[in-house]
Image (cartoon, helix red, strand yellow):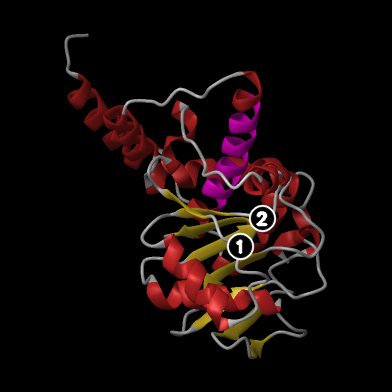
């Protein structure tokens, strides 16, 4: 009971590394699980939105087949495409809007999974043309890590939109796109999935808070501290595993 906060943080981080287990899913299975998790999390918007992860070969990535909803995606019906959206494995065509994913992957070697969706609270906030405000402890993985694109460049099927969106994202993990939706750029599928769930909740909380009064900012130093405390591979992995257990009860077919 006499240890400093710094000592306790280091102790907890060490314990998490040894006690929180990793999963054994393949990347296509994790991508399919992510589609189902986000479907259950309210990210479904018909055929809108794309979820991708890098393939083994440079310049390739997995994505869903156009015409299938998030709740229909399985490890077996994913496509492997190159950055010009030519299908290398699988049957069908990718969403043409995947082109701006290629631009993000080109400019960000640290990114291994991209999630772009139009969930209702994010979409509603995007209509107001105001950035995401992170003013709650649980939302701090996005603290100073969510960019904002105020000007809508139109449907993202051209290279111009890819350049604009990847440029606006910069080195951040997330971006709110006005009149559009959100994009998460994760180092892993687990991280991207967890942050996608988080950004929609953050938008919901922001809209609720705005309806009641003025949102008060949190101290920058504490926001950064919370960002770093929560944003670790072990924490993201544990959260992803929880979402997976919850989702597999209703979507056990997605792994085939």
Q: Is residue 86 left or right of residue 55?
A: right
The N terminus lies in quadrant: top left
99 and 246: which one is in front? 99
Total label count? 2
Q: Is 204 colored magenta in this rendering?
A: yes
* Coordinates of residue 77 in the picture (x, y in percent): 74, 74
Q: Are marks 2 and 1 in contact (CB under 8 Å)?
A: yes
Q: Is 71 colored magenta in this rendering?
A: no
* Coordinates of residue 12 in the picture (x, y in percent): 30, 29
Q: Which residues are magenta?
A: 193-208
249 and 102: which one is in front? 102
Residue 6, which numbered label?
Answer: none
52 and 171: which one is in front? 171
Q: Earlier in the sequence, mark 2 or mark 1?
A: 1
Residue under label 1: 152
Q: Residues within 10 Å of mark 2 (few under 14, many from 20)?
A: many
- Using the rendered image of the protein, determine whether residue 50 is visible from the camera's viewpoint: yes
Residue under label 2: 179
* Coordinates of residue 105 in the picture (x, y in percent): 45, 74
In terms of secondary structure, where does tag 1 sit?
loop
């Amino acid at each position: 009971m006499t240890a400093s906060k710094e000592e306790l943080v280091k102790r907890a981080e060490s314990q998490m590394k040894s006690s929180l287990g990793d999963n054994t899913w393949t990347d296509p299975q994790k991508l399919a699980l992510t589609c189902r998790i986000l479907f259950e999390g309210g990210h479904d918007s018909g055929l809108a939105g794309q979820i991708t992860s890098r393939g083994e070969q440079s310049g390739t990535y997995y994505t869903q087949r156009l015409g299938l909803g998030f709740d229909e995606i399985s490890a077996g019906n994913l496509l492997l495409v190159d950055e010009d959206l030519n299908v290398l494995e699988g049957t069908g065509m990718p969403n043409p809007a995947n082109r701006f994913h290629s631009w993000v992957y080109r400019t960000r070697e640290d990114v291994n999974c991209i999630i772009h969706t139009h969930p209702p609270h994010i979409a509603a906030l995007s209509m107001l043309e105001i950035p995401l405000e992170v003013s709650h402890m649980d939302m701090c993985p996005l603290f100073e890590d969510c960019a904002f694109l105020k000007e809508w460049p139109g449907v993202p099927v051209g290279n111009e939109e890819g350049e604009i969106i990847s440029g606006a994202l910069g080195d951040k993990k997330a971006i709110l796109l006005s009149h559009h939706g959100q994009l998460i750029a994760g180092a892993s599928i687990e991280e991207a999935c967890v942050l996608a769930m988080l950004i929609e909740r953050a938008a919901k909380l922001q809209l609720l808070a705005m309806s009641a009064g003025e949102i008060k900012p949190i101290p920058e130093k504490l926001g950064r501290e919370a960002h770093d405390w929560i944003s670790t591979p072990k924490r993201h992995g544990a959260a992803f595993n929880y979402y997976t257990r919850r989702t597999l009860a209703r979507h056990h077919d997605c792994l085939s």
